[in-house]
Amino acid sequence: MRQDLYQGHDYYLMDEWLTEEHKLIRETARAWVKREVSPIIEKAWEDGIFPRHLIAGLAEIGGFGPYIPVEYGGAGLDQIAYGLIMQELERCDSGLRSTSSVQSSLVMYPIWKYGNEEQRRKYLPKLATGEWIGCFGLTEPDFGSNPGGMVTNFKDMGDHYLLNGAKLWISNAPFAQLAVVWAKSEEGRIHGLIVERGMEGFTTPTMHGKWSLRASDTGELIFDNVRVPKENLLPNKSGLGAPLGCLDSARYGIAWGAIGAALDCYDVALRYAKERIQFDRPIGGFQLQQKKLAEMITEITKAQLLTYRLGQLRNEGRATSAQISLSKRNNVNMAINIAREARQILGGMGITNEYPLMRHMCNLESVITYEGTHDVHLLITGKDVTGLDAFK
C-alpha cells in the first residue's frame, strides 16, 4: 500500500491570499483524504465500486453543499473554500470529487436556487449530512452536448405530473435517494422535477464496463409513467438556462478539482525523479526530466492563478459561463497532459497500481468529456470572443 506523502505545491505563494479559514478547510479535507481514502482508493478503483462508507466523512468535511446557507444545513462557505475542498478530493480521485460535486452543485444548488422554501427545508438538510444522496438527470442516450434536444417529458394530469423518458451517464444514480430531473413540459419548456426513489416506474440500473471513474457509481434513470407530485416541480427557474446554471457551479468545481489531480501526479513524479538512480545519479538531474517537471509546475501555477481569480469573481457574482468554460477546459487539459508526462518519468513503474498515475489518467479521460466536452468549451470561448455562434 503506497503511503500518501503529499504536502502541496505553491510555487507562487498563493497561500498568502487564503484566509485562515480557507487553510483550515483545506487541511481538514486533506487529512481526511489521507486517513480514510488514500489507503483504499486503488482497490476501490480496481473493484469498480464507490466506497459508500465514505459518505458520512464527506459530509463532515463540508463536501456536500459547503456554500449552502447554514439555515439549510450547509456550511455557508465561500466559493474559494468550495474549490479547495474539490481540489483535495480530486487530488485523491476524480470519482470521489464527482460524488461530492454532483451532490453540491447539481442537486443541492438547483434546490437552493430554483426551489421554494418548503423544498429547501425538506431536502437540503438531509443532503448536507449525506443522509440522502442525489443525482442530476440531464444527459440522455441521444442528447449530450445538445441537451435542448431532450425527449424526456412530463404531462399535467391534474393532481400530478406523468414523467416519461430516460437519462444516461448519471453519477450517483444507482444509490441516490432523489434525482433532480430535467424534462420538457407539453409546451416544450424545460423544467426541473424532484423525483424520489420508490416512486412507481422509476428505476436506476447501474452501468458497467467503465475504464474511467471506476470508484464512482454511474447509472441510468428510467421513467416509465412516473407519477410526480406537483409540489416537486422546481418553481423559480425554467428553460435550458436552469440546468446550465447548475453546470456552471459544477464546472467551476471541476476547474479546481483538476488541479488536484495534476498536483498529485506532479508530486509523485518529482519524488520519483529525486529517488530513482540511473547512470549513477538521480534521473531528476537530467535535462529532459527537468524540462518535464519545470513545465508541469508552470502549467499548474498558471491554472492555480486562473482558478483563484475565477473564485473571486464567483464570490462577487460576476463570473460568466464563458469564463467558467475556459477554466474547466484549460485545467482538465493541463491535468491530463501532466498525468501522461508523469507516467513517462516513472517509466514502467508508472503503469502499476503502486502509483496513481494511470488511475488519474483514466479518470481524467471522463472529466475532459463530461459537463461539456473539451471541444464544446472551446467553441463557447470562441463564441464569447467573436460574438458568432458556431453551434448553429
Image (spheres, helix red, strand yellow):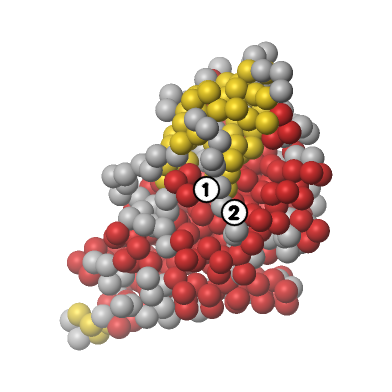
| Residue 274 visible to an observer of this rendering | yes
Q: Which residue is mark 1?
A: 176
Q: Residues within 10 Å of mark 2 (few under 14, many from 20)?
A: some
- Residue 154, how many percent across, how many down? 61, 21
Residue 80, percent from left and from top: 68, 61
* Residue 132 numbered mark, or none: 2
Indicate which disc residue 67 carries: none
Q: Do labels 1 and 2 touch, CB within 8 Å?
A: yes
Left/right of residue 304 with respect to residue 210 in the rendered view: right
The numbered mark, 1 or 2, whose residue comes first in the sequence reads 2
**Crowding at mark 1 (Cα within 10 Å: few <14, some 14-19, many 20+):** some
Q: CA distance from mark 1 to mark 2?
A: 7 Å
Quadrant assignment, res 111: top right
Q: Quadrant of residue 360?
A: bottom left
Q: Is residue 80 in sight in this rendering?
A: no
Q: Position of residue 367 (x, y in %)?
A: 45, 48
Which residue shows up at 24% across the image and 63% down it?
351
Amino acid type of the residue that numbered disc 1 sits on in the rendered structure: Ala
Q: Nearer the viewer, residue 305 or 192?
A: 192
Residue at the (38%, 67%) spot, across then down: 41
